Amino acid sequence: MRDNLDLASSAQELADAAPTGSIDRAAASSVAITLATTRDISDARKTLDGVTPEEVRQAALALFDRLAAS
């Protein structure tokens, strides 16, 4: 399994590729920052539960799940 910083790097690449102002960019940025600043996958997942607005939280959780499963 990849560590938080590896996953953060992947999420940041997705954020950089997403259109400015899009939900996908906001979600990927949220995932990248969260993964880079938490100790482990479990902490990152818990932290993402607090992302707002709801649309960004749902997109961030979906992206997190995809990245964590890879």
Image (cartoon, rainbow, N blue to C red):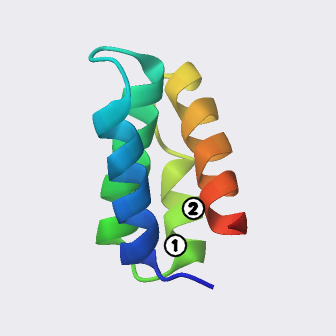
At mark 1, the secondary structure is helix
24 to the left or right of 68: left
Question: In the rendered picture of this protein, how many numbered marks are placed on residues?
Answer: 2
Instruction: Check the image and report above or below for 28 versus 35.
Output: above
Q: Which mark is residue 69?
A: none
Q: Which quarter of the rendered picture does the N terminus lie within?
A: bottom right
* Residue 65 picture location, percent across and down: 69, 55
Residue type pointed to by label 2: Lys
In the image shown, does 70 or 32 lie closer to the viewer? Answer: 70
Residue at x 30%, y 14% (from the top left corner):
21
* Residue 58 picture location, percent across and down: 63, 32
Q: Look at the numbered discs 2 and 1 and tell me whether their residues touch, using CB distance below 8 Å.
A: yes
Cα separation, mark 2 vs mark 1, equals 5 Å
Residue at x 47%, y 26% (from the top left corner):
24
Instruction: Check the image and report above or below for 7 versus 30.
Output: below
Q: Which residue is mark 1?
A: 43
| Residue 26 quadrant | top left
45 to the left or right of 7: right
Residue at x 49%, y 44% (from the top left corner):
50
Residue at x 42%, y 58% (from the top left corner):
10
Residue type pointed to by label 1: Asp
In the image shown, does 33 or 20 lie closer to the viewer? Answer: 20
Q: Which residue is mark 2?
A: 46
At mark 2, the secondary structure is helix
* Residue 23 picture location, percent across and down: 45, 20
| Residue 17 quadrant | top left
